[in-house]
Amino acid sequence: MYAVVGCGECSTLWVVEGRPGTTSCPSCGARHRYERLPKFAETDAADAAREARTALLADRSDHAPDDLDSFTTLETRTENERMDEAAYLRESGVDADAATEAGERVTSGEASTTTGRLDTVRNAIDELDRPTEEAVIEYTTAHDVPTEFAERALERLVQQGEASRTDGAYRLL
């Protein structure tokens, strides 16, 4: 059961499901006892209650309810007439091709190299005979990984329990 009810404080209309003891106005927050609220419509279907609320709001705003499509029709039209990304960007004054290229640069740039850098640090620990911090940094620098990144990665791997450090040498766990 759904009911369209109205707030005595601010005149807002909303749909209430079931028969709760109390309900709050979504606009002003006033708490009301359900049985004392004016019920403008009661239906078994949520869509019918929303349509009744829409018709009541249309009456208030001087729009005839016959001029309005049903809630279900509007929802279907919205889904069918949805604008694709390229059209949205074009309507917003953005070059869609340039935006796509920028997105590809971001996803193939820093984000993917960060993963590659961390893999390089892991490979250094795995491949070196005695992977001390100095040896790992030497290995990673030779593979275009900045020293600062390698130092932070070693610390993070130990803190996260992915590696251990014993007598200055690292080992993957």
Image: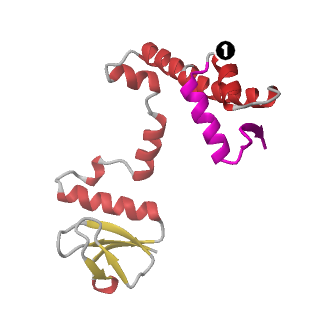
Along the horizontal axis of the image, is 6 left or right of 21? left
Residue type marked 1? Ala
Q: Which stretch is magenta?
A: 145-173
| Occupied quadrant, residue 82 | top left
The residue nearer to you, when weighing 54 against 158, is 158
The residue nearer to you, when weighing 49 against 137, is 137
Q: Where is residue 75 in the image (x, y as percent from the top left)?
A: 44, 46
The image shows residue 31, relative to residue 15, as above or below, that is below
| Occupied quadrant, residue 8 | bottom left
**Picture colour scheme:** secondary structure
Q: Residue furthest front?
A: 167
The residue nearer to you, when weighing 103 against 40, is 103
What residue would you read off at disc 1? 142
- Residue sitting at 31 percent across and 48 percent down? 68
The image shows residue 91, relative to residue 27, as above or below, that is above
Give the number of marks. 1
Q: How crowded is mark 1: few (under 14 residues within 10 Å), some or many (20 or more)?
A: few
Q: Where is residue 76 in the image (x, y as percent from the top left)?
A: 47, 43
- Residue sitting at 46 percent across and 75 percent down? 1
Q: Where is residue 7 in the image (x, y as percent from the top left)?
A: 23, 73
